[in-house]
Image (spheres, rainbow, N blue to C red):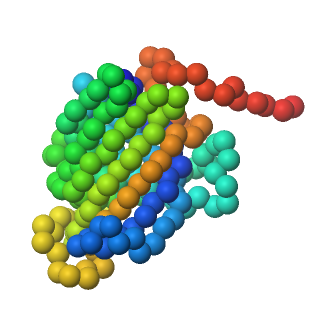
Amino acid sequence: MPAKAFVLAMAADLARSDYAKPTLVRSRSREWLIACRWGPEGEYLSIATAGPIVGSPGLFAPEAISPVHSMVGLLVSESDRQSSSTFLLLRQLPRQIELAGTFFPADGYVLLQQQDDIRLTCEARYSHSCGWLDGREVRKDIPDPAPGSAEAMAWHIEAVRHNWIGEFFPASEPMRREPLRVSA
């Protein structure tokens, strides 16, 4: 079963497509993500974009990455046999949750798997209007966007965990990792 709480960096392959035709991929990119799971039962998951991957991602995520745009998921099922958790993405941020970065309302799901390492698959579409409140960007869900809207698209994300100085697992490390090599 995947860990119930963590903060980690992931190298992700992103494919962006049309909101109305999610199978029609229009562009691809590689980005760093920050994934965070929390809650009394590990019921919340946030996935935040944290910047483009420049060159090969190597063994380590950059130290200075931070959340930019965040999607939030709510746990809908778990499988001990498959060591996986599935989250439903939220179109509205629950009132009690505060996020780093800007909340992105989204429809879709996230599959989190933990076997030899933590992997994430996400299929999402989102449509929103943009504005500002108290100096912070705010995005509000639009349930039925106009065709061809610039603020409506679909994402396909495949990501895998990478070593990162900001990584956090409470209590104990859930799996063995490569030892950090330091040269004098």
Q: Residue at x 29, y 57 (%)?
A: 124
Q: In the depicted view, which residue is nearer to us: 59 or 85?
A: 85
Q: In this picture, is 37 found above or below 63?
A: above
Percent across and percent down for residue 135 are 31, 65
Instruction: Residue at 59% x, 37% y: name it.
Output: 163
Picture layout, residue 66 above or below residue 149? above
Please, which residue is most extreme toward the right here?
184
Q: Is residue 58 visible?
A: yes
Residue 4: give x, y in percent of width and height: 34, 26
Check the image and report above or below for 138 versus 172. Answer: below
Residue 145 on image: x %, y %? 17, 75
Q: Can residue 97 be seen by looking at this rendering?
A: no
Most distant residue in the top direction: 171
- Quadrant into which the N terminus falls: top left
Q: Name the residue at 17% across, 64% down.
A: 141
- Where is the C terminus found, in terms of image quarters? top right
Residue 25 lies in quadrant: bottom left
- The residue that appears at 45% across and 51% down in the rendered structure is 158
In the rendered view, does 182 fall on the left or right side of 94? right
Q: Tell me where residue 3 appears, x and y as whole percent.
A: 39, 26
How many callouts does the rendering have? 0
Observer-nearest residue: 62 or 150?
150
| Residue that sits furthest to the left in the current view | 144
Viewer-proximal residue, 113 or 47?
113
